[in-house]
Image (spheres, grey):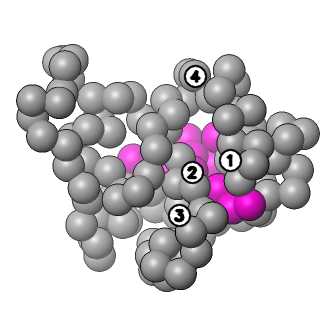
Amino acid sequence: MDGETTPDELADVLETDDDVRVVDIRNPVSFTQGHIPGSENVPFQELPQRVQTLADAEHIVTVCPHGKSSVQAARLIGSYEGCADATVESLAGGLTAWRDQYDLEQADEAETTESPF
């Protein structure tokens, strides 16, 4: 793991760098209710089995609600041999910090197939 990035730094990277992959580690229902535009959903419990899908990335930023679990996810990704050359960061403050300054993208309710409860 290479540290944390702020919402402003991530927004700048998203505008200028096509190679960044934003990995939202929440469950699919939470992801569809609101996420950073362009992010992909890889639930934390699935990350060990799916980390190899990130092997081609140059820059990875992990995201969770408050920026705590995403640190663990970034460490896991950073320890994977296939991501050794990637910059791997966690979003400081998580989606709570992002939402203070930027909008979240939301899926249509019709796309949500699971109940959040």
**Residues at discs 4 and 1 in contact (Cβ within 8 Å):** no
Q: Secondary structure at mark 2?
A: strand
Front one among 109 and 79: 109
Q: Is residue 30 above or below residue 87?
A: above
Q: Residue type at mark 2?
A: Thr
Separation of disc 4 and disc 1 at Cα?
14 Å
Q: Residue at x 90, y 39 (%)?
A: 81
Coordinates of residue 26 in the picture (x, y in percent) = 42, 35
Q: Secondary structure at mark 3?
A: loop
Q: Between tags 4 and 1, which lies in front?
A: 4
**Residues at discs 2 and 3 in contact (Cβ within 8 Å):** no
Q: Residue at x 53, y 61 (%)?
A: 91
Q: Residue type at mark 3?
A: Ala
Q: Report the residue marked by disc 1.
A: 74
Q: Report the residue marked by disc 3.
A: 92
Of the residues under marks 2 and 3, which one precedes in the sequence?
A: 2
Q: Residues within 10 Å of mark 4 (few under 14, many from 20)?
A: few
Whether residue 15 sits left or right of residue 103 in the image: it is right
Q: Residue type at mark 4?
A: Glu
Q: Residue at x 26, y 59 (%)?
A: 104
Whether residue 42 sits left or right of residue 20 in the image: it is left
Q: Report the residue marked by disc 4.
A: 46
Q: Is residue 46 above or below residue 73?
A: above
- Residue 89 in sight from this viewpoint: no
Q: Residue type at mark 1?
A: Ala
Q: Report the residue marked by disc 2.
A: 62
Of the residues under marks 2 and 4, which one precedes in the sequence?
A: 4
Q: Secondary structure at mark 4?
A: helix
Q: What residue span does the magenta drawing correspond to?
A: 58-73
